[in-house]
Amino acid sequence: MQHFSMGVWTLAVAYATSVIGSLMGLSCASRARREPAPRKKVLWTVLGALAIGGVAIWLMHFIAMLGFAVTDSPVRYSVPLTALSAVVAVLVVGIGLSMITFGRFGVPRLVLAGVIAGVGVAFMHYLGMAALEFQGEISYDPVLAAVSVVLAVAAATAALWCTVRVRSTAARTGSGLLLAVAVTGMHYTGMAGVAVTVDSSGPAPTGADVFDLVFPVFVISGLIIAGLLWALFTSLVEPLATERAPTG
């Protein structure tokens, strides 16, 4: 079994992707928190969930899994379970964010939202691992699996706290970098506890090759990122245009 069969670039790209998603997601969530209009608050919360859950967490997981290989067996992926794991990531992050962007902020609410989002993110990770198909069986070290769940809860709670407390661009950038470290660390901690038993006499896996998924995943992700960047850019430009518009 290998986690970096294609080289350490998968780790670097996975981390960079998580940073990008974290920065966009924190910006969207912060905007949702400040937005007085309910419809716009919902919109920015959804965009934040797509950025953090879809890009910073799920897409990071997908990229990191490009380096996963099992000796003496091809590795395939169940497309329905892989797609479901992406939906779960966005959904649980959205639930956590909505608990912070709507209603009064408080420590109990923050902790509950962090636990819900974090446990959900950990579930997404192991659901994505359940999509793996190869000739053999997979097992997990219970201690490292538990640590990965704790890291997921800590990362989710930190992200939600940053949504409320972080104001400046520099502070948000630092928060995005640290959040990406926590998310990537959660993934590789869980993967460190993976053990596989290969049975070459078993049936060949029938799922999709990971590279069959690369094109649709990156096209969809690219469209999501482009949409998020457009929303963030226009939200910055429009107030400036309003301020500079001639009066009278």
Image: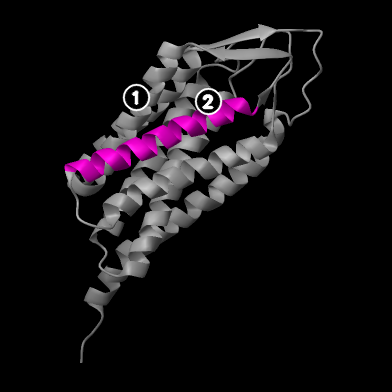
Question: Which secondary structure type mostly characterizes the magenta part of the structure?
Answer: helix
Do we see residue 66 in this rendering?
yes
Along the polypeptide, which appears first: circle 2 or circle 1?
2
Do we see residue 54 in this rendering?
no
Picture quadrant of residue 176: top left
- Which of the pair 56/196 is nearer the observer? 196
Picture quadrant of residue 69: top right
Picture quadrant of residue 109: top left
Q: In 3D space, how far apart are the residues under numbered discs 2 and 1 (Cα atoms)? A: 20 Å
Which residues are the magenta region? 107-131
Of tags 2 and 1, which is closer to the observer?
1
184 up-or-down from 36: above or below:
above
In the drawing, does residue 215 fall left or right of residue 101? right
| Residue 109 on the magenta span | yes
Kind of residue sitting beneath label 2:
Ala
Label 1 element class? helix
- Which of the pair 125/111 is nearer the observer? 111
Circle 2 residue: 64
Circle 1 residue: 150
Label 2 CA crowd tier, 10 Å (few <14, some 14–19, many 20+) = many
Q: Position of residue 104 (x, y in %)?
A: 20, 55
